[in-house]
Amino acid sequence: MRRLIAAGVGRSAAVIALTLIATSGFTAAPALAQSDEQAVIAVATHFFDGMRARDTALMRSTALPSTMVVIPGGPTGIQVQITVGQFINSVGKGTGPGGDERMQKPKVDIDGPMASLWSYYTYTEGGQTKIDHCGIDAFLFRKGPDGWKIFSLAGTIRKTGCTPISK
């Protein structure tokens, strides 16, 4: 009898342990995905924080040196294509407050070590209150030992139909 009771307790403990392991796996995945999503948004936000402050070191900390900045448009389909270093240097050469680029409801998709962020944005020249232009920003990120870093950045630019974003 004692052996049957002990076996029953052992089986119950095993079932409980397996249930805990199984459910903890299901709850850990969304938490990890959520923290990765927040980290990706934070990297893009820091890039724009660097623009506002003309903090080139902050901007460089968010992107790989090989990152390209692309603006589609014009007769060839590519209006601007420069390195992120060239873009950052141009931001750093300015004086006064930097441009204020704001995202609205960024959509993040993650697959392992790669993430994309797609978002409507508005851009206001430094020190101004009127929106200069707006469009869509599209970032690609890679996750490495140093966290999420931008490896590609593209955006559209339009001067009409710009809806303000609350700060």
Image (tube, rainbow, N blue to C red):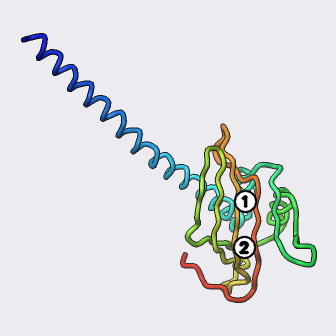
Residue 112 x/y as whole percent = 61, 44
Instruction: Tell me if residue 26 comes above or below residue 73 in the rendering.
Output: above
Instruction: Tell me if residue 73 comes above or below residue 144 in the rendering.
Output: below
| Quadrant containing the C terminus in the rendered view | bottom right
Q: Left or right of 75: which side holds 3?
A: left
Which residue appears at 81% of the width and 49% of the height? 65
Neighbours of disc 2 within 10 Å: few (<14), some (14-19), many (20+)? many
Q: Which mark is residue 99?
A: 2
Which residue appears at 92% of the width and 78% of the height? 75
Tell me the kind of residue under disc 2: Gly
Q: Left or right of 72: which side holds 6?
A: left
Which residue appears at 49% of the width and 52% of the height? 34
| Quadrant containing the N terminus in the rendered view | top left
Residue 23 x/y as whole percent = 35, 40
Q: Nearer the viewer, residue 100 or 79?
A: 79
Task: Identify the residue at the far right of this view.
Answer: 76
- CA separation, marks 2 and 1? 12 Å
Q: Left or right of 114: which side holds 60?
A: right
Residue 11 x/y as whole percent = 22, 22
Q: Which mark is residue 55?
A: 1
Which residue appears at 21% of the width and 19% of the height? 10
Tell me the kind of residue under disc 1: Asp
In primary-sequence order, the first of circles 2 and 1 is: 1
Q: Nearer the viewer, residue 87 or 57?
A: 87
Q: Which mark is residue 31?
A: none
Helix or strand or loop: what does disc 2 sit on?
A: loop
